Image (tube, rainbow, N blue to C red):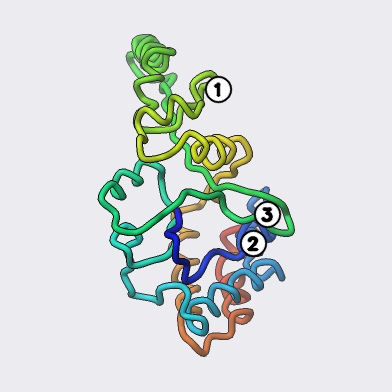
């Protein structure tokens, strides 16, 4: 979402739009030191410390209170804008050299095959996800059923958003969206990456050196 007055926005070369990846598809090769990632993180560093377009480390900026010009969030958060005193819009993320992209989250339900009541759990799962109940769940999450993933369905629980916005941003975004990078060793990797990126959030940081250091830290975890 963006307000009508923008102090800054995301770069079309950042992240997936610019081809930057934390690691390869098979999870074995570090991508933090790639040229694409260096370019993306250099943009972010410049935006924070030089252009002052992004909030700096430790700064709390709330878009919904009018403190920021842009935020990336769930559509349900639009309800917080009911009494907003500024103009705002819902727009797709910008495209880049690698084309258009959207980042989506996923949630799922399953049954443990070896659980003592697997059959009953499977029956409940079928009931919970049948067309009627999926329509009820659509009030909280965009539904996975193609027949229900429509602007009309989403508009019922998001009255502040126009059908055209929902179609252009949410529905089209889900169709071509990608999930955030994950890994079998995600928990350990996340902690290590966060710590290794700490030196980046200083005005004088050497972005390329920091990112090379990230790869040095996580390569043993990636099996390389």
Classify mark 2: helix, strand or loop: loop
Q: Residue furthest bottom?
A: 204
The label number, if any, that marks residue 24 in the structure image = 3
Residue 124 in the image: x percent, y percent?
Answer: 35, 13
User: Do the residues bearing badges 1 and 2 touch, measured as CB atoms within 8 Å?
Assistant: no
Instruction: Using a 10 Å C-alpha cutoff, classify the residue at mark 3 as few (fewer than 14 neighbours), some (14 to 19) or many (20 or more).
Output: few
Identify the residue shown where x is 52% and y is 84%. Answer: 50
Q: Nearer the viewer, residue 59 or 153?
A: 153
Q: Residue at x 60, y 65 (%)?
A: 11
Residue at the left extreme of this rendering? 83
Q: First in sequence, mark 1 or 3: give its number.
A: 3
152 relative to 102, above or below: above
Q: Dot 2, how many residues are within 10 Å of its Cα: few (below 14), some (14-19), or many (20+)?
A: some
Cα distance, mark 1 to mark 2? Answer: 29 Å
- Residue at 44% x, 19% y: name it: 113
Residue 183 location in percent, x, y? 55, 49
Q: Is residue 14 above or below residue 148?
A: below
Read off the residue under disc 1: 146
Q: Secondary structure at mark 3?
A: loop
Residue 15: name its quadrant.
bottom right
- The residue that mark 2 highlights is 12
Q: CA distance from mark 1 to mark 3?
A: 30 Å
Where residue 4 sits: x, y (%)?
A: 44, 60
Q: Name the residue rendered at 50%, 70% in the picture.
A: 8
Residue 12 drawn above or below residue 27: below
Query: The C terminus is located in which quarter?
Result: bottom right
**Mark 1 surroundings within 10 Å by alpha-carbon count, few (fewer than 14), some (14 through 19), many (20 or more):** few
Report whether 213 appears left or right of 67. right
Residue 51 visible in image: yes
- Within the image, what quadrant is residue 111 found in? top left
């Amino acid at each position: 979402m963006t307000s009508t007055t923008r102090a800054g926005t995301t770069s079309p070369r950042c992240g997936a739009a610019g081809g930057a990846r934390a690691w390869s598809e098979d999870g074995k090769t570090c991508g933090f030191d790639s040229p694409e990632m260096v370019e993306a993180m250099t943009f972010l560093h410049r935006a924070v410390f030089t252009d002052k377009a992004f909030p700096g480390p430790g700064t709390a900026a709330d878009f919904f209170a009018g403190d920021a010009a842009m935020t990336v969030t769930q559509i349900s958060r639009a309800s917080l804008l009911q009494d907003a005193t500024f103009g705002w819009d819902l727009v797709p993320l910008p495209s880049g050299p690698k084309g258009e992209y959207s980042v989506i989250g996923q949630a799922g339900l399953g049954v443990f095959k070896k659980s003592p009541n697997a059959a009953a759990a499977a029956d409940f799962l079928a009931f919970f996800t049948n067309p009627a109940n999926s329509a009820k769940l659509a009030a909280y999450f965009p539904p996975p059923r193609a027949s229900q993933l429509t602007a009309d369905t989403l508009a019922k629980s998001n009255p502040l958003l126009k059908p055209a916005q929902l179609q252009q941003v949410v529905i089209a975004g889900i169709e071509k969206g990608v999930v955030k990078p994950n890994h079998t060793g995600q928990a350990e990797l996340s902690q290590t990456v966060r710590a290794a990126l700490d030196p980046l959030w200083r005005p004088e940081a050497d972005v390329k050196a920091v990112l090379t250091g990230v790869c040095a830290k996580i390569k043993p975890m990636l099996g390389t």
